Image: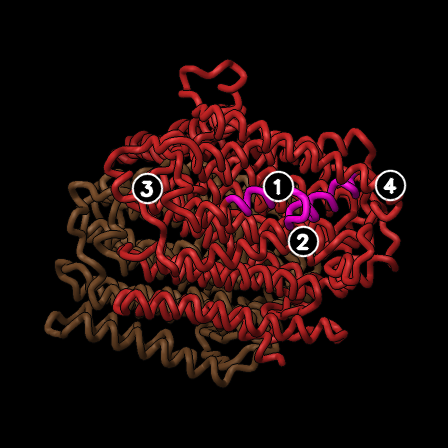
Amino acid sequence: MDILIALIPFLPLLGAALNGLVGARLPERVVGWLGSGTVLLSFLFSVYLFAHLHGGAEPIRTTLYTFLAVDSFHVDFAFLIDPLSVWMMLIVTGVGFPIHVYSIGYMHGDAGFWRFFAYLNLFIFSMLLLVMGDNLVMLFFGWEGVGLCSYLLIGFWYDNRAYGKAARKAFIMNRIGDLGLLLGLFLIFDIFDSFAYADIFSRLPVLRLDPAVLTIIGLLLFVGAIGKSAQIPLFTWLPDAMAGPTPVSALIHAATMVTAGIYLVARCHPIYSLAPTALEVVAFIGLLTSLVAGLIALCQNDIKKVLAYSTVSQLGLMFVALGMGAYAAAMFHVTTHAFFKALLFLGAGSVIHALGGEQDIRRMGGLRRALPVTYWTFLLATLAISGVPLLSGFFSKDEILANTFAGAGTGWWVLSALGGGLTALYMSRLLFVTFFGNFRGTEEQRAHLHESPRVMTIPLVVLAVLSVAGGLLNLPHLLHVPGAEWLAHFLSPSVGESRPAHLLSAQTEWLLMGAASLLALSAIAWAYWAYAVRQSVPKDEAALSRWERVLAGKFYFDEFYDWVIVRPVERLSQLLHYYADVWAIDGLVNGVGTAVQRIGVEFRRLQNGNIEYYLLGMVVGAVLLFLSLWL
Amino acid sequence: MALLLVLLPLIGSIVLLASRALPARMVASGIALANLLLTGFLLMGFQADGRYNYEVSLPWIPQAGVAFRLGLDGISMLMVLLTNLLAPLIVLSIGTRDYDREGRYYGLVLLMLAALNGVFMALDGLLFYVFYEMALIPIYFICAIWGGENRIRITLKFFLYTFVGSLFMLVALLAVYYQSPSDGVAAHSFAWEALVAAELDARTAGWVMLGFFLAFAVKMPLFPFHTWQPDTYVSAPAGGTMLLSGIMLKMGVYGVIRWMIPLAPEAWHVWAPVFLGLAVFGIVYASLIALKQSDLKRLIAYSSIAHVGLIAAGVLVWNKTGMQGGLLQMLAHGINVVGLFFVADALERRVGSRALFDMGGVARSAPRLAALYFIVTLGAIAVPLTNGFAGEFLLLNGVWKYHYALGAAAGLTIILGAAYMLRAYGLAMFGAAGPYTEATPDADRRELIVLGCIAALVLVLGFFPNWALALTDGSVNRILGAVQL
């Protein structure tokens, strides 16, 4: 069993190493299937472990070796297989595998084909370390590792300087969060004298800590989550990250890596449950991000940027769930979101592929006839994310909204539901502008319009099935069907039973569910009327009203950071170099040198070789000596 | 055995400096490799419980309590390993350029190797001082003869600055010596144990610590004693820069661990806050300056000031995580900085310039060089599972334990370090090729060997750092225990 567990992350690492070392000399077919095959094996092994745990087995802890040890400051390279980690493993490898397969088609003919698969596999390795680690330092390994892979893949087409900058921006903004996480780790060690989850959570009730300390820990960890999961104020890297090839956006910037922050909070829920203030902050940041990103998404015209802001917004919603203490609900939305958001990105990739690289939806339109599979799967994903009843997103979002109502009251519910309504609006706008109406691209593009090859469409269909049926994983208990709330029960050993919505009456829950569905459906209907029936096309920049311009300009976060942080720091760098370093400090050092030299020149005059002069000096010296004794 | 580590390169250097007929490259590589093998051999039979292994003590000036005494505890062993691991790589890398009178160059490198091994093994205060100064002479000539623009002025400044610093150390050493107990023959003794046993009053201890600090702070260098360093690193030939940054600056940190604090612990409470303030301020200060540098070598030079500032801070807090982190990071930093300067030199040879803005697009034409450079960069920005991580993690924790605010400030290095390193990498490797980089040749065989070894070390030490910690664990306990703060 230990070997099997270790193989799960190390197989993709092996794939990365092989493709990285000799991939350039292998044919595409071999590279692609080596990359995908290792992930498939990891997935199958994860399924085996899942079945094992589902059969009622205890969580498994397995140590490979001691990574570092300085007395009690001890870090094992060790894995913990419990419901939460196995569930994340299933998502990472289960969604990762179809995305790998899809990439075989999408990256076909790219000079860096082998490099792409090496990086993707390295990402899977890092992400698996993150979720499988049995201690916070292992999580940190994966945490930084996925950031690194994200950097490599955003900047994959490195000839383009702008892509390279986007990659660096993502890495550095993540590192800002990482510093918070690192300090959180140190504080945890100071208090619990261990990094291992088992030790920390078992010592937690015994220690009777000041809630203020736990709040600080919770907030420091959350700073890390803000960076990784692209929340306000560290969210601006994610839209830029769309510079990477589209399968990367699907895998890393939608389905898996960006949910690491959710995983972190869910994993550390015993700490958060004792730190209500930290949870309030989590919920507040989540809600704010959800609304801000949803509004921005309304006015974006790049197909991938819309999806990127949608991801930011959905992640915000997940943090709202965490903030309510509904950890299982957040994990449920992580799951369904992985399905439909990965599908949306892959569908967008299929569109971009068909149009020869075009990403502006204003130059698309009417694509449903030319790309039927892409269209139907994209449609299902859009309906799912919008919360249309019975699709996966409906159930997971409803779960979050019900918990928000129960946990924080009507006001919070209205705002969260509004976030959901915005989702339906910008997603259906995207759908109708892209696939309905007339084609607005060039004649050349029209001639080349084609559905993607099967290696790309089959993953779309697989993910579409999951997006539709994903709700079955965790049907609301209202329905009184067997298997209701299955996922919550499965995860409860890891994330607890906390679910405020259980306090609500069935009537209230039905009412909330109906209201949210109505909101989603009317948003879709409005978008259908505006973009499919009236066939209006998003306006050009110049024609935007002032408010639309603010939204299209993303509330000017980037400009603000540029003026307040980036430029001053760069200016400071130059000032320190020229004035502090070269002029002041080095000038002082040189000054001492020159002064010594000058003094040397003066003293040399004394050594003039004139005996009388020396004698005079001697006599004066002797007199002074006597005088000093006498005085 | 330990003596051979000094004698072998010493003989080699004398032979090379005296005779011009020999194939200098072969002789130097052979001796460097022999020293590496010898180090491996010493490592195999090593007892890592904190005592001295392979101790030799020859009478030198018994009337004054001076002995030629060498020995290796875990800390020394790690430093000797670092020195002799990097030496063959440095010797090999010198061969990538044709130097005038290269026999002398290699001879001086070997002399340097002898002195460095001596510094890290000396258990006698005066012997330590002699080796410490002896290391300065060959590097002075290397920089002054084979250096670039303004080499005479820059090298003289470097020499005078470090030499003056060392004089303060000599005075401090003598001050402790005159308080040391008798060894039975002479009234006082330079033996490490005797110097540690010397009881100093608070005032003397303060001056002694300051004297040592000046010498070591200049050598490392720490803010604000660092201004000789960027110029010297830029102007020195690549081999000299590697020797300086990879190994020689560790003499300063080692000196703090072995001599400065153990000899004057009474002054730690007074001076540590000041020194730590300088070290941590220097981390942020040098990182900020590195952010906008356009000369690749100068950028690496400033990054080295930042990294060494963190190592010094971890050592100065004088707790176990900090100390272990510092030792581990010295090994990692040595490997990384040698790799970085090697890449900088490889690029300079190809592009004909060190300016980042003259580069760009190298990844396309020289993918192997780009990939290996990337691995070294990862080590330098301490990505987990590369060699930079474990040390930095321990160091930051050590500083955090001393004071959380200081730890948080030092932690800024993980953001700023990523910013300047990735900026340099992006400017050099990514983007479209410029006029100088259109047909950059990829790494040749010699370069692949050097960089391949370095990249392998980055990863192996990254996955498995604990053996190095185990090597020094006993000695760190012993030295922490021997010092009553």
* Label of residue A471 in the image: 2
Chain of the residue where label 3 is placed in the rendered structure: A
Res B403 seen here: no
Spatial distance from mark 3 to mark 4, Cα to Cα?
A: 49 Å
Mark 2 residue crowding within 10 angstroms, few (<14) / some (14–19) / many (20+): many
Residue B484: x, y in percent? 70, 60
Q: Earlier in the sequence, mark 1 or mark 4?
A: 1
* Label of residue A314 in the image: 1
The structure residue drawn at horizontal position 39% and vertical position 46%, both measured from the top left corner, is A371
The structure residue drawn at horizontal position 72% and vertical position 59%, both measured from the top left corner, is A487
Whether the residues at callouts 3 and 4 have beta carbons within 8 Å, the answer is no
Query: Closer to us: mark 2 or mark 1?
Result: 2
Residue B80: x, y in percent? 44, 70
Mark 1 residue crowding within 10 angstroms, few (<14) / some (14–19) / many (20+): many
Q: Left or right of A312: which side holds A348?
A: left
Q: Nearer the viewer, residue A261 or A350?
A: A350
Q: Are marks 1 and 3 on the same chain?
A: yes
Q: Earlier in the sequence, mark 3 or mark 2?
A: 3
Whether the residues at callouts 3 and 2 have beta carbons within 8 Å, the answer is no
